Amino acid sequence: MMNKVPPHLCVKCKGYRKLCGLPVCPIMERFRANIKAIMSVKGREVEGATPPSVIVGEAHYPNVPVIFNVPPNVRGDAAKGFDDPLGWWGRVSLDEIIRRRAQQVASIVKVKVTDPFKLYDNEVSVAAVSLKPVESEAVLRKPPKPKLTFSAGLDPVGPAAEAEEVRVVGNAHLPRPLERLMWDDLPASEGAVELYRRDVDMYTIIRAFSLGLLGRVRRRKLVPTRWAITAVDRTLTNYMLRRVRTLPEISDVELYEGEYLGNKFKVILYPGRPLIEWVEVWYPLTVFTQTALKPLIIYNKATPLGRTETLDGGFDAAKFAVIEHLSRRGRKAAAIVIREITPQYYASVGNWHIRETVRNTLSQPPRKYRTLLDAVKDAVAGMDPSTRREVVELLVPVKYRKIDDFLR
């Protein structure tokens, strides 16, 4: 489905000949940022404020790595900018996101998923859901070392090392609703919905869910971050979808457009039940399509009951943003989300940018159309003829077109 840059090309290039066609080498950008982070570490001790940034990994489940990220010697509010999806959107470039993430030192501790209270006792989980950066210290088993691997497609991460100890020395400032909810004995899904209803931001909810701060008290577990993101997206989408299905339909066909980090989004809303279709168009020379000779098209669909044809975290993030928009607007609609991935998206930074770009796209005034076919044709107008034709036929099959579409 998606092909990575061939390793032999990276080895031949060594990061400076740009043989892959990318504007900059993400591997070298990350390596330089790693060096900067390591030079700020004093032996085995790391000091600074977590933005907060805490990740629960999947490896060796149920004994999973918990990764506590700290930009060395960066303190106070300045640390916030090292992991801040809501603050980054529309303001921070892909180059800068790579640098900021790679400048954090990752202190790794192993924790059994059935023992989330171990992280509560040393306040790691509390620091992870703080509204402000929290002063922290870590003692590593070995000093971190830079690692230069010529293999494209890797996430921009900082130098990592196993930690003997992680200490939170500052005071965490938790959202009031979460402070009250942490010891309530109710299912994690209900806790996530309650926090969302009380305006706790999405990323704090995900970290709380992942670190076992929600759920039946005696049955709480750590949840790998990647799983937690999808679980929260789906839980909140299904919660809002129950209401959206009962709302009156929109009256027009609407087209919204937005762009960020080399990703272009077109969102079409049209009268109907909340069926959501997802089309990704991956162009050649992106970090995942170096060997592709033409654009690759990926299709997925979610029924009005919220069921999807295949699992896709990016689609879940976009679907959440669409249903959130309809819920706040007080209307129901069917939707099409078209994502075009250009060569400017040369490093994977997670699904947050999909969620936030669709959210921001839907906050702009739309263009309105008489028919769905007209809107889809406008949405794909910038694609090459072959791709344009394929996407139109995929989204508006002949059997769904009106007779006057052919007469015009």
Image: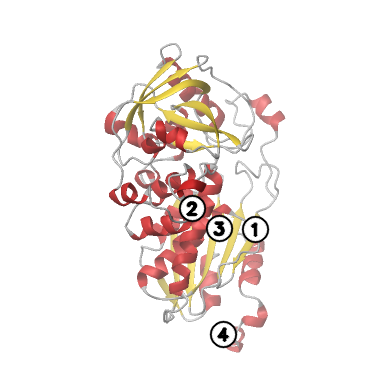
The residue under label 2 is 354
C-alpha span from label 1 to label 3: 11 Å
Q: Earlier in the sequence, mark 4 or mark 1?
A: 1
User: What residue did someone put label 4 on?
Assistant: 408
Report crowding for label 1: few under 14, some 14 to 19, many 20 or more residues within 10 A (C-alpha). Answer: some
Helix, strand or loop at disc 2? helix
Q: Amino acid at mark 4?
A: Arg
Q: Which residue is mark 3?
A: 315
Q: Residue furthest front?
A: 218
Badge number at residue 273: none
In the rendered image, residue 245, in percent from the top left (x then y), is placed at: 47, 76
Distance between mark 2 and mark 4 Cα atoms:
36 Å
* Mark closer to the observer (4, 1): 1
Q: Earlier in the sequence, mark 1 or mark 3?
A: 1
Mark 2 vs 3, N-terminal side? 3
Q: Residue at x 46, y 33 (%)?
A: 118
Q: Secondary structure at mark 3?
A: helix
Asked if residue 179 can be seen in this view, the reply is yes
Which residue sits at x=61%, y=38%? 62
Task: Choose mark 3 or mark 4, whichever is in front.
Answer: 3
Marks 2 and 1, how far apart in space? 15 Å
Task: Report which quarter residue 190 is drawn in.
Answer: bottom left
Q: CA distance from mark 2 to mark 3?
A: 8 Å
